[in-house]
Amino acid sequence: MAGLLDEVGLGGERVTMVNLSSAMGAQFAEVVAEVTERVRRLGPNPLGNTREHEKI
Amino acid sequence: MIVGEQKSLAEIMELLGDARRVLVAGCGTCVTVCFAGGEKEVGVLASELRMKSKLDGHPMEVDEVTVQRQCEWEYIDPLREQLDGYDAVLSLACGIGVQAMNERFPDAITLPGLNTTFLGLPEEQGVWEERCQACGDCILGLTAGICPIARCSKQLLNGPCGGSQNGVCEIDPDVSCAWQLIWDRAVKLGRVDRLMEIQAPKDWSQSRDGGPRKIVRDDLRLDEAE
């Protein structure tokens, strides 16, 4: 997936895959905070806001 | 089965040129089971094309369709009405499907999204290896069930050659020497005598060497109305 996004030009760093169980609440919060911060740093999605009816 | 591999996104974009309305057409048989051109792969590629073309500033409108078999008229005929209005059809079927589309719908340009590579099998999940060259004159009965046409790098019929070392072909340490495999199996099955029989030279005219091939089965043909 990351490779695909890199090839398209959106940046593979925008996607993260993590394995968690529902009992791992603290780790979940940590990962979400980290990913949110990373994506914020990368800036808005170059594709812009997609309208609901538009296929992507 | 026929095994294929998707062309790079760059090559596909180059083939599509300035097409703005594109139909990506997949196939439900061989290219589905080698994960190159089935419904899911069509969906992923169509998304890639939409994203890439939008980022490049020339957004493409990309639609998707997957037929059960792209190589047979009755499965692709239902696409006829759909094809109007597309600048190009990008087929993720094997080369046969691409040509079937071009032959059946000559007014539409159907481009290949895959490289059709070989006839082979999945040795393990995710790894496909060539096993058959469709030579038209199968000798597997003489070679203990292992094909020297497809699996010997030199297609030798009286192998092995001097490049065979420790059961491995000189061209690549990951390629088994086909003749080592044949010999070992013949010994194990007690069929060495079959291997030692002198055979007439192989009739290569049955292979691609004789030109494009055709099979006619009169027992299957439909009677044409008089």
Image (spheres, coloured by chain):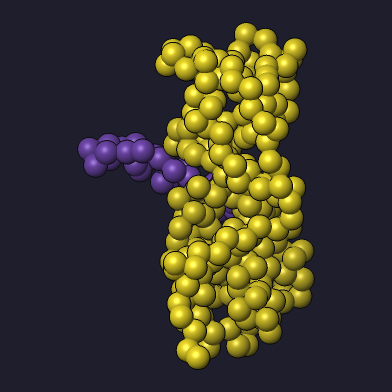
Judging from the image, what is the letter of the chain drawn in purple? A
Whether residue A3 is visible here, answered yes or no, is no
- Depth check: give the residue in front, B50 or A15: B50
| Residue B7: quarter of image | bottom right
| Residue A19: quarter of image | top left
Question: Which residue is drawn at the image coordinates 59% and 17% (left, top)?
Answer: B196
* Image hue for chain B: yellow
Q: How many marks?
A: 0
Whether residue B8 is visible here, answered yes or no, is yes
Question: Which residue is drawn at the image coordinates 66% and 63% (left, top)?
Answer: B112
Q: Residue B202 location in percent, x, y?
A: 68, 36
Q: Is residue A53 left or right of residue B84?
A: left
Q: Is residue B64 above or below residue B35?
A: below
Q: Is residue A11 above or below residue B45?
A: above
Question: Which residue is drawn at the image coordinates 45% and 33% (left, top)?
Answer: B124
Q: Residue B110 location in percent, x, y?
A: 66, 72
| Residue B46: quarter of image | bottom right
Residue occupying the far left of the picture: A23
Q: Residue B220 location in percent, x, y?
A: 44, 68
Q: Is residue A11 left or right of residue B65?
A: right
Q: Is residue B30 left or right of residue B89?
A: left
Residue occupying the far top of the picture: B166
